[in-house]
Image (cartoon, rainbow, N blue to C red):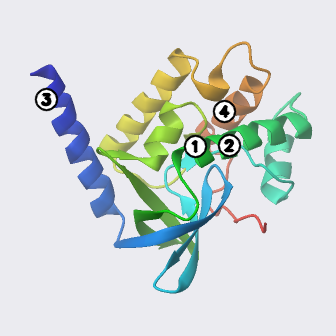
Amino acid sequence: MACEDYIMKKLIFFIAILTTLSSAKEGTLTKIVDGDTLHFQTDNKDYTCKIAYINTPESSINNQLKHDIGACQNISTKLMLSAGESATQHANKLLKVGSSYKYSTYTKNNEQICEISLGNGITFSEKMLLDGYAVLWQVSKKQKEEQNFNSVLDHAKSKNNGLWANKSEKSKAIKCLDKISRQGLRTSEYSLPSK
């Protein structure tokens, strides 16, 4: 019975996320820019999507990377880029360029914010958090959604998943990114890197 309750809660949570996002689409993934930025082609149009609810380390030198490095102490550009590359590689394990995915979108500050269904009631955002390659991104969420995402992130930290592994030098990068996010230092007017 406990397992059934968990599955039902997950299903309700997933439906709530999809109804929060305004426009449901299906498209072909054309590029994985990094762990939280993807390109889709839908109805012969190209869409650049910032993934909802999460932030991953940058995988190329851009203004956001410079901001993150400036806010972190004792984190080198090389280390942050290495952590960003790990997050990008993990995204490549979860998603396949050329495959079709269902995703929901809304627009905030002239950018497309997306959430992708991986099936079985789990989203890409949730999986990246759970596997330890992302932190929460400062976006407006309902309190129940925020509590769920915080518990997923806390689980990843407690299990030393992904970049949170204690012996990993890259854990310094994800810990710093988490601190930036929790302090609200990361701007909600996130600008997409030009790649």
Mark before the other along the chain sequence, 4 or 2? 2
Q: Residues within 10 Å of mark 4 (few under 14, many from 20)?
A: some
Disc 4 versus disc 1: nearer the observer: 1
Who's the residue at 83% across and 53% down the image? 60
Q: Position of residue 144 (x, y in %)?
A: 30, 42
Task: Quickly name the residue at label 2.
Answer: 89
Q: CA distance from mark 4 to mark 1?
A: 26 Å
Who's the residue at 64% across and 34% down the image? 178
Say if mark 1 contacts mark 2, CB within 8 Å: yes
Say if mark 4 contacts mark 1, CB within 8 Å: no
Q: CA distance from mark 3 to mark 1?
A: 28 Å
Who's the residue at 63% across and 49% down the image? 35
Q: Residue furthest bottom?
A: 44
Q: Is residue 137 visible?
A: no
Is residue 193 or residue 86 the one in the foreground?
86
Q: Is residue 21 left or right of residue 63?
A: left
Q: Position of residue 79 (x, y in %)?
A: 85, 33
Q: Residues within 10 Å of mark 3 (few under 14, many from 20)?
A: few
Q: CA distance from mark 1 to mark 2?
A: 6 Å
Q: Kindly state the secondary structure of the residue where label 3 is placed.
A: helix
Task: Quickly name the residue at label 4.
Answer: 179
Task: Quickly name the residue at label 1.
Answer: 93
Q: Position of residue 47 (x, y in %)?
A: 57, 75
Say if mark 3 contacts mark 4, CB within 8 Å: no
Above or below for 6 versus 137: above
Quadrant in which the N terminus is drawn = top left
Mark before the other along the chain sequence, 3 or 1? 3
| Residue type pointed to by label 4 | Lys
Q: Is residue 7 left or right of residue 90?
A: left
Disc number placed over residue 4 in the picture, else none: 3
Q: Is residue 14 left or right of residue 184?
A: left
Above or below for 32 versus 10: below
